[in-house]
Amino acid sequence: MTAVLWLALAFGARLEARLPEPPLGLDLYMPAPEDNPLTPQKVALGRRLFFDKKLSRDRTLACAGCHDPARAFSDGRAVARGIGGAEGKRNSPAILNRGYGSSFFWDGRAPALERQVMQPILDPKELRLSVVELERRTGLKAADVARALASYVRTIRSGGSRVDRFFAGRRDALNAAERAGLALFRGKANCVACHVGPNFTDERFHNTGVAWRDSRLADEGRFAVTGKSEDRGAFKTPTLREVARTAPYMHDGSLASLDKVVDFYSEGGRPNPHLDPEIRPLRLSGEEKAALVAFLKALNGRVRDGWR
Amino acid sequence: MRKTHGWGLLMAVLLAVPALPQAAPAPEAMLGAALHQERVTGNLQEAIEGYRKLLATKGVPRSLAAQAQYHIGICHEKLGNQEARKAFENVVRNFPDQKDLATQARQRLAALDGGTKHTGGLTARQVATGPDVDIGSITLDGRLMAMTHWETGDVAIRDMAAGQIKRLNLKTSWNDSGDFAEWPVFSPDQRQIAYAWYSNKDGNYQVRLVAAETGAKPRTLVSNPELEYFQTAGWSRDGKSILAGIWRKDRTAQLAWISAGDGSVKVLKSLEWRSPQRIVLSPDGRHIAYDVLQKQDGPDRDIYVLAADGSSESALVEGPAHDAAPFWTPDGSRVVFLSNRSDPMDLWSIAVREGKPHGAPQFVMADIGNVEPIGFSRSGSFHYVQNRSDEDIFAVDMDPVTGKGRGPAVRITQTFVGQNQRAAWSPDRKWIAYHSRRGHSRYGPGAMSLVVRSVETGEEKVFPSNLQVVRSRPVWFHRGSAILEPAGDPQGNISFHKVDLGTGKFELLRATGARFRPVFSLASDDKTIYVWMRNEETKTGGVVRFDLSTGEQTRIYTPPDRVFVTGLSLSPDGRTLAIMLSVLEGEKRRQQVAVVGMDGSGFRRLVESVEALVPVLGLAWSPDSRYVYFVRVKKPESEVWRAPAAGGAVENTGVAAKVLKHIHLSADGTRLAFTAGARANPELWVLENVLPALKASR
């Protein structure tokens, strides 16, 4: 199919089709920019581009290289790897339910998905393509590539987990250990201070001490974007949906398992001058830690992408 | 749009004033001080004097002078003085360059024209008052209003023309059960009512449906322990779905449609902890207007419009001002809302086209007050409820030996009358701390401020914050320089904060990560509290020694099954806890006052009563730790009694007042502070001619 035809399909007449209802647990309302309403055609184009290796300079990597559907749209590595094996400094986040997000990347430097999707394509350490080359290879304007990719990413949704069924009133959807984990999640462990709402994230930035190494910040996080002192070492709260499938964890992939993540928070994170006040020693028992992990595993559900 | 002033900034300005004793105060500080008088202490004459002094000062920036002139008008308006007109005219004439203020002054003048407080032919009349008045939902034809009948907890229908009330008899009295209905709303054909129902037995809210006839049998649509609260807000036009606000167990809020058939829930939008106050469906059923907190820990709201099918959303009214309580006009072309953008709470409106704002907000009526809107009828009548209260804090002299009251009780403060509660004497009895409702929100973060008042001079220091003050009094640390304030976080968990009275800083001492009613007492080490904690999962509770510095908890007393601790007070010598117990026997309750040692031993019952006793904050000790004071609930006046801690006959202190509660005895036993008074009967009002006024304002 020619690029011209793609364009006509993608950005031609406004279609009234609506994105199918989301999986259980997610909001019906998903924000989308007025100049980029969701259409099946754009989503289909975005999906094709997402898996297309021509979007990398040496045609070896696609977006899906770091956001693998088989791994809940993460990559299983500690830090992202670009073309030629170049390593980034941060973990590839699982791009689930990002259509509900309000800022993007671990430091929130992109205010919209349309802005976010272009950065890895153009980043010399990731797909290393130029705008000119991108437009030549796809036959599309870069802005249209961005709109299509953003539209597709909006359709990547995870829901319908056993936790969602429990919240919907199915009391048998969680076992005793998982229910105990939920009580800890809301109570003693206070995970809901940050992991809140249908997507289990407050979309805000917190310093948990992960970046504090050898009495200094190895990564300044959100501070690099805002220049505000309180943002030093702060990173965006990630979703917990499918969390058992997206190891390793934290912005730098430094914690290999959910057990280690729970241990980290039980100890009160890593004290540093900008530690979020919500992070404090929890002194969880072994049983409590196991319950919390059991609950987190129950957040695995169904991941859907595309217009379905 | 004029930015609302932050109290923190005001306090900073005020605190700066004593630091400049020799120099003339800066104009900003003078304005801050006058604003403080106007808004914080409520002393309008002092405020006017302050503004005049500022105007008389040389070199005052025009922006500050205009504000001073404008606020003179506001103060006079509040006082009902004719000088308000002159003050506003001065703003218009002398400060045309201060455009926002000049516009607001013109609007105030327009409001004053017509000779009444209301403008543009608007007239307000009281429709009803009494214990059976409440907010509800009114039918578009204006004939009927569905509401809660708080005398019984039943759903009732008010015939607006005849003034008659028909109850549905879902329950007949509070003796039946502690169940009650909230947010009843008519179906489009007026044959059914959807409502939220609190089930006392299950301890949760449900959504129910009932035919709008006396004796009809209700049907439960939603009953899910994960969903803690509902606001049923409207019906889809086809009558198949009910629009509702849902509050989940983690206290986050959602907008959702509930199927009137099978009760299935479709969440439209999650709002985290930015709880909506009002949710309203447009007359054509296509859009939902709602107000949410701008920040989860702040009191101000903005208004949004969401497509009823979840396909789009727009900010309708956003900005630093508090904009709340939206209601659609009958033709759906405008949303009317309350706003403090021009200082007091006024009525404003904004045009809406296809779910989006169309033009700027328009002023409708001045100073409607902090009312609870009900909505429009088709004719354009706007209904609302006005609540008033005569509840306040009082003090009475006490004989420290006999424990008897001496002379009449007197109101502790003359500022913000009817808005003050829960007073506590400082250890040296030179100050008294209390909570005062000073925000524009009736509930939620920032609604209540901590006030510390000098007993000798009457000077009041206000310590505003965005804390969600829970129903506990301010507790003095024993050195008297700080106060312990428990508060609820967005999830409803209790945290303890230290308020430094010197700096005004609030410091989080301990987040407990648990939900409980903070019935507690502070030990003399200023770090240990004794607190009743109940685990809602296991349904068990006990009195716990809680170390605020480490979070360590040790249970010291566990009551028997079906016995609950409802009050608690530590003796001055630190050796004994007085506790109030509620004993459940079948459906009946007995109240007890008892003492128990600090290791949980030596339980001794002092009072046994089938009559109600005032629970939380209803206990106090004599300075010598020999007597425990408690309050018997009686009509017309509740009474303060005392019982010997060693056992023996109880004595009436002679102190009595209507709905007396929250007692606190000074450390020397010579003064007793308490809260007394009650909410007055709510008033149902209707504002006529609103639609012509809206047309005129376009």
Image (cartoon, grey):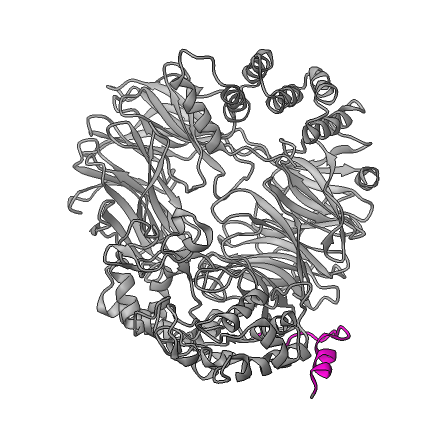
Q: Residue at left 70%, top 30%?
A: B99
User: Is residue A4 highlighted in magenta?
Assistant: yes
Q: Which residues are magenta?
A: A2-22
Where residue A86 sits, quadrant-wise, is: bottom left
Is residue A237 something that shows in the picture? yes
Q: Residue at left 27%, top 64%?
A: A264
Rendered view: B176 above or below B256: above
State the residue in front, A130 or B140: A130
Q: Residue at left 34%, top 22%?
A: B431
The x and y percentages for residue A180 are 33, 68
The x and y percentages for residue B357 are 72, 51
Counting labels gives 0
The x and y percentages for residue B467 are 43, 41
Which quarter shows the C terminus of chain B?
A: top right
Is residue B214 something that shows in the picture? no
Which quarter shows the N terminus of chain B?
A: top right
Q: For this view, does A57 lie left or right of residue A114?
A: left
Rendered view: B656 above or below B289: above
User: Is residue B24 highlighted in magenta?
Assistant: no
The x and y percentages for residue A13 are 77, 74
